[in-house]
Amino acid sequence: MSDGKTIILNRIREALRENPAPRPHASHTSSDREEVPRDHTPREWLPKVGESLVEQIDLFARQSEGLKTELHRCGNMEDARAILSMLTTEGGWKKIATHTTPDTSALLEKNCSEILKTDTGYRIDDLESCDAGITGCECLVAQTGAILVSAPSAGGRALSVLPPHHIIIARTSQMVPDLTAALELAKKRYGNKFPSFLSFITGPSRTGDIERILVLGAHGPKRLTVLLLEG
Amino acid sequence: MTTFASEFKKMAGRYTADLTHRAFIKKALSGYYQKRDDSKASFQSWQGARDLAAETKYEAVNHLDRYLVEFAEKIEARGVKVFWAPSAGEARDYILGVARENGVRSIIKSKTMTSEEIHLNDALEKEGYGVFESDLGEYIVQLRKEPPYHLVFPAMHLTRGQISDLFQKELGSAPTDSPEELTMIARSVMRQKYCEADMGISGANFAVAETGMISITENEGNARLTTSLPRIHVAILGIEKVLPRLEDLALFLPMLATAGAGQQMTCYNTMYGGPRQPGEIDGPEQMHVVLLDNRRTEILADAEQRDTLGCIRCGACLNVCPIFKNVGGYSYGTTYQGPIGSVITPHLRGLQDWKHLSAASSLCGACTEACPVKIDLHHHLLQNRRNAAAAKPVLIEKISFLGFAWLMSHPSVYHLAAKLGRIFQPLHPLVNGTFLDPLIAWTRSRAFPNLAPTSFHEQWKKSRK
């Protein structure tokens, strides 16, 4: 009795033997099972991104607007703190969740809310009761307005999705042009030791499941704020 | 006629006659077309991207053994248990076993069509587990005890009024006609379920061989919660989901979003490589990946239709299909509706039982044009018809075509037949639509056109004189 793996692999090899499928393009005429030469990269076809940082930040800002991501350019940490305190007052926040990085710590100086830190773990109901979650990120993607987060850069998996308002503190030096660059960066940073969780966040949670009408905050955060610091 | 075919005919007749339903579906899709076109236009070349996507999938599918092994080895090295399931039953048994061994009580699910395919919920519920669908559309159809209407938009056939009534009845909520309020009701119910669940079941849109990760595309955040909070994560995916390289996601994530929902990127595109790793603070203790064959290897063996394994389940072919828009998602009686469903269901569940779906097509090619990975859908529908007739010829069709061929190769008989037709047509109204009508199959729902007083052949002959 062979196991499932052997059965499936045998079926696959049997199906592929002497049974070439037509190639998608006439330019590839050989029909052996060698790797298809890749003449093109996604970059050639995907939405175009300017080369300078200014253009990229501009594009990221435009994409954010369309996605209903609230992007704030902050000249310095003082500006970022002012925005956070405005949000805190406006939302009547009592408890904020975060993880420890130099920027999150600096941001939360002087904030009088109760702080839950996820650095060494948390209780789910405790995190669920927070009004906002503040995290860092791996990088910002100009092309699509996405933000790449990971377990280490966003305080685990749930901090960036469970509280109803997600705030990301990022720096302009974290801007990358496109998705390809973001994935390359992750590969370079982690080599073979990838975190178990990496996510492109593109705007606040949303659904169109009722009459295809857009509603924000389906299960994840209803609001997404990016505080973008210079440097 | 098989029962599946007669059921299809019955349902398709009913839905096609339901003009309100047709108008509702048309309206629901109109916003999608606009957004999809805008998103396509932002590409430097959507056609170039399609070519590259088709090439990448070709590479993956034609080396499926190599990439699957690579994927499994990489993800196993990160502490994931990979289960290879040759059949639906084996996949169900494995997942039931995991639940049993771990003393699971409550299960939360994010959207997975593969689990619909193997009827996982039924199996879990039969064993006494509480199973909750967390995707809003899936949750709605689950409460209605219905299957998904559309593989991407499960509840697109329901009005807000129907959903409000449903929530009132099942959840005791106050009536409302606001989609936002309805969404918030589901959100708060589901929050409770996430916190209680000890097992999360998800699908996967892609499996990356190079890095040993699965990638899940979603908008709501329900898949992220499903894979973050419970102590066990089970991901179930078809063996065809594998992509060679991590960079391939840079192409497929925006293409899936564009074709599927008219977005440049969906809200969350998450890559999971294992359960909680050393040094991480949350995430499940266990992660299981179930690789499902369930007759996908039979599609693989059909070189002509192998490209259908490149399907990324975006639903674009449904959204443009004139048949889907008229007969709706439920007429098909399949897990996968629309053109892709009509092509692959005969492979997954038997050609003779499901060949009728390949005949329910206008062969207009809109599906092929919409497909982001360039699956030759409308030709595959023709091939299914050919294969079905070759495997099991239908006597009446065979006789008809023999007669037709004979008629067409005997011009004098043909002309005589045309003349007789012209003579007898004025008598047709006497029997039109009755059981005596020889054209009843046509005239039941259509008018029969009048034959021209003189044929083209006759006119041609006359003008040459």
Image (cartoon, coloured by chain):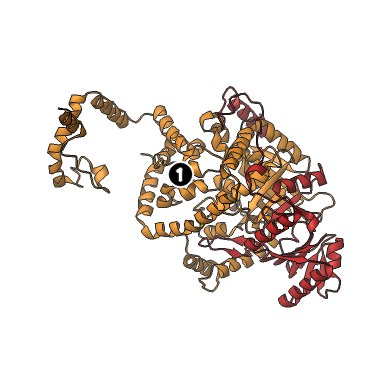
Number of marks present in the image shown:
1
Residue B142 quadrant: bottom right
* Left or right, A51 with reference to B164: right
* Residue at 83%, 67% in the rendered image: A76
- Judging by colour alone, the chain drawn in red in this rendered image is A
> As displayed, is residue B447 above or below residue A32?
below
- Of residues A162 and B61, which is closer to you in this image? B61
> As displayed, is residue B415 above or below residue B231?
above
Give the colour in which the image draws chain B. Answer: orange
Crowd band around label 1 with a 10 angstrom C-alpha radius: few (<14), some (14–19), many (20+): some
Residue A28: x percent and y percent? 59, 28
Specify the subunit that label 1 lies on: B
**Secondary-structure class at tag 1:** helix
Disc 1 residue type (three-letter): Ala
Residue B129: x percent and y percent? 63, 55
Residue A53 quadrant: bottom right
